[in-house]
Amino acid sequence: MYKSGAYAAMMAAFLLLHAAANAAQTGDSYTFKLTGRLVKSSWCTVNNDQPITVNFGNVGVTKVASGQYVQNIQYTLQCQDVTGTSTMAMTLKATASGWDPKAMSTDVSDLGVYILKDGQTMALNTPVAITPGSVPKLQAQLTQNPDTTLPEKAFKATGTLVVEYK
């Protein structure tokens, strides 16, 4: 059952919408012009459209904070019609951990994963310029929320690697 104030507000809003729909249209008109440019669509394929898997194996929970757990990310990159004048960008789309905006979240709350491009931590969800015709070296590095203790359990993290060019 509605409280009388809420019900009256709903009815007033309905009546105003109804009155606006039936009001005579008056005013001026203005002609505008839209312009654009059609371009040939090109595409890139990352890892032959197959999932990229990085397996860390057994990880010592007391050693994650040291940064020693780093794995190379093996992947391929093929872009159609790339030239030396093409502008390319790579973006890692992923959910950040709640404690570090550059660490991908995992299903273990205090464990995260940095993605390194040529040795430097990539910002998540932010395009980074890459050289046309090259495949940047990517690595995954485990990290943890400082001053926490990690549990012994399996973990996983997911993200999407997007490569675009013009």
Image (spheres, rainbow, N blue to C red):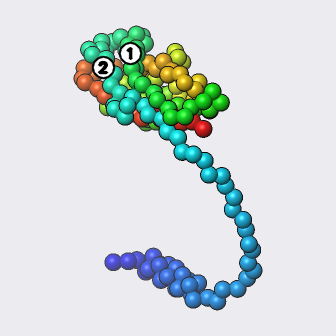
Residue flagged by tag 1: what amino acid is it?
A: Gln
Q: Which residue is mark 1?
A: 71
Residue flagged by tag 2: what amino acid is it?
A: Asn
Please say if the residues under marks 2 and 1 sit with CB atoms less than 8 Å apart: yes
Quadrant location of residue 82?
top right
Closer to the camera in the image, 36 or 71: 36
x, y (%) of residue 41?
54, 45
- Look at the image and tell me whether residue 117 can be seen: no
x, y (%) of residue 21?
56, 84
Total tally of numbered discs in the picture: 2
Q: Which residue is mark 2?
A: 55
x, y (%) of residue 158?
36, 32
Residue 106, numbered circle: none
Label 2: which secondary element: loop
Task: Tell me: residue 72, above or below residue 101.
Answer: above
Q: Quadrant of the C terminus?
A: top right
Q: Residue at x 30, y 14 (%)?
A: 59
Left-right relation of 115 to 131:
left
Q: Residue at x 60, y 30 (%)?
A: 83
Q: Residue at x 33, y 31 (%)?
A: 51
Question: How far, Cα to Cα, is label 2 from label 1?
Answer: 8 Å
Circle 2 Cα neighbour tier, 10 Å, few/some/many (<14 / 14–19 / ≥20): few
